[in-house]
Image (cartoon, rainbow, N blue to C red):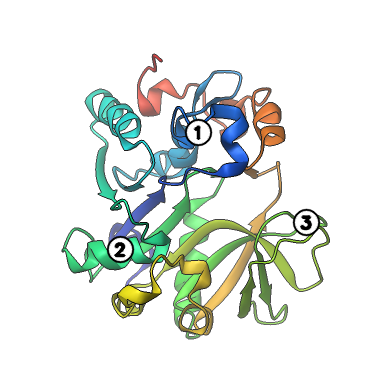
Amino acid sequence: MEDRESYLQNTEVIVHAGGLSERWYPVTQGKIPKVMTEIGTNPRPIIDWTIMPYVKAGIRKFFITLWHNPDAIIQHCNEISRNTGIEFVFLKEDEKRMGRGGVIKYYLEKGVLDTSMHKINVGGSDIVNLDLKSFVKFHVEGLSKGFLATLVGSETGMTQFDKIIFDSSTGRVIRMDVDRIVDLPEDSHANTGTVYFDDGLNKVFMNITEDQMPIDWENMGDVIFNNARCFGIARLFESWFPLKTPYDYKKSKDIDFEKWFGIDSVDKYLGSYQK
């Protein structure tokens, strides 16, 4: 088995940034991609804060899935590359959506994503102040117990998000409940959109059929969740800031994300930003 450092080095980080998001429409009127919405007291696009914990940890390459209005995201990421040397690989969906699972299948088959490498999947508008070393440690420890996937969950009394239903004694995921309700039941966490997949699950994505698409990994059922456990370290608005609604946007404008991440300057990590 790989040690934790080698395991992380053999991991590809995928940020899903292609969504249009009907709930976000009042904020942007669809004129710009959701992840390009500026937030924070030092305004930067959402995607900058989404990738921050990984950049802090030394990740220098990201795979960005694209669909709605991709050019603005590409231009912004290319500017970051010019300033920092961070590499971005763009995974464009066709006009017909593939979903967060389908796009992985497509680019594994194309050889753009490596079938021998592990995958961290990140929601483009879910900002998680994640300790990557702790995440890798928990995930690698789970491999010896048969867990090939680790879902980052948030324990909270209220949720508008997908729920991770799990066995509290083992952390084993039972299912993902995609019906959004207000009250979060016991033995369940809100889904933060961040998940670690061992390379042993790449074949599961490869087995997605054309008639199943579009399909998100959250909707792939037992082929994912029979091998998964929950890492419930996120706390809503403390270490996880989801951007789903105009209310979230309004709240985000008053957040000092540099302080939130414990950094002096975002420019040090991503270069300067001009709209």
Labelled disc at residue 202: none
Q: Quadrant of the N terminus?
A: bottom left
Residue 72 falls left or right of residue 37 = left
Say which label, 3 or 1, has the lower sequence index: 1
Residue 217 falls left or right of residue 13 = right
Q: What whole-number distance in Å separates the C-alpha atoms at marks 1 and 2?
A: 29 Å
Residue found at the far top of this picture:
274
Say which label, 1 or 2, has the lower sequence index: 2
How far from the left and from the top, in percent, is residue 10?
28, 62
Q: Kindly tell me whether residue 7 is visible in this rendering.
A: no
Q: Quadrant of residue 111?
A: bottom left
Note whether 82 is above or below 129 in the view shown: above
Labelled disc at residue 156: 3
For label 2, the SS is: helix
* Residue at the (49%, 62%) spot, across then down: 195
Pointer 2: what residue? 6
Pointer 1: what residue? 46
Disc number lying in front (3 or 1): 1
* Residue at the (30%, 63%) spot, across then down: 6
For label 3, the SS is: loop
Disc number lying in front (1 or 2): 1
Q: Quadrant of residue 199?
A: bottom left
Q: Which three-letter amino acid code belongs to the residue tagged 2? A: Ser
**Residue in the foreground of this view, choosing between 163 and 60:** 163
Q: Would you call the spot at circle 2 few (<14 residues within 10 Å), some (14-19), or many (20 or more)?
A: few
**Residue in the foreground of this view, choosing between 19 and 53:** 19
* Residue at the (39%, 40%) spot, across then down: 55
How far from the left and from the top, in percent, is residue 28?
54, 28
Decide: marks 3, 2 in contact (CB < 8 A)? no
Say which label, 3 or 2, has the lower sequence index: 2
